[in-house]
Amino acid sequence: MSSRRSTDRSPGPLYTAEERRRRDASPWTVVQGVLAPVQFLVFAVSLVLIARYLVTGTGLAAANLSVVAKTATLYAIMVTGSIWEKQVFGRYLFARPFFWEDVFSMAVLALHTAYLVAYAYALLPPAGLMALALAAYAAYLVNAGQFLWKLRQARLQGAAAAPRAGALPEPAP
């Protein structure tokens, strides 16, 4: 083993060839691809409803319902994402390529769940609930950015691994 390998800090490929094959064959890949934009749409609508309440003082029920809907979509994407991660990487959470995204996802889940608890038990006044929802949404945006970055990395690595059209095969040694 060379000394270069022990000091090399590059993360390596996001997927091995076998993980890429499992990812591409998994129906959960499609589920994640559908749920992610749905969750973002619910988030965007909810953000508008929260802003409307904070600016006008009207529409509290709609704002609260929208945060509950956003949290439901988050739970759905987390459960199905864990199943996807198990199929692709052999573990439900914290697989090597998505370790930090999963760590931050736990914070996102905690903030959304804290909102649900505070809402269900009337632990905060409306403005406090909205502030907690906005904190949860800020964390969600950071986490979504993490996953978008990984999606970009996967596409770049996939393009680099794909044989170029018209390229001659490497000669045998």
Image (cartoon, rainbow, N blue to C red):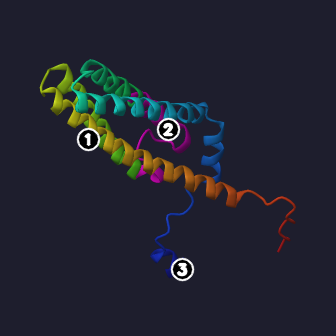
Residue type marked 2: Lys
Majority secondary structure in the magenta region: helix
* Quadrant (top left/top right/bottom left/bottom right) for the N terminus: bottom right
In the image, residue 90 lies in the stretch drawn in magenta: yes
Q: Earlier in the sequence, mark 2 or mark 1?
A: 2
Closest to the observer: 131 or 90? Answer: 131
> What residue does disc 3 label?
2
Closest to the observer: 65 or 168? Answer: 65
Residue type marked 3: Ser
In the rendered view, tell whether residue 132 sits above or below residue 166: above
Give me the C-alpha separation between circle 1 and circle 3: 47 Å
Residue at the spot 41% in from the left edge and 27% down from the top edge: 73
Check disc 3: other Cα within 10 Å, few if <14, some if 14-19, many if 20+.
few
Residue type marked 1: Ala
Q: Which residues are magenta?
A: 75-99
> What residue does disc 2 label?
86
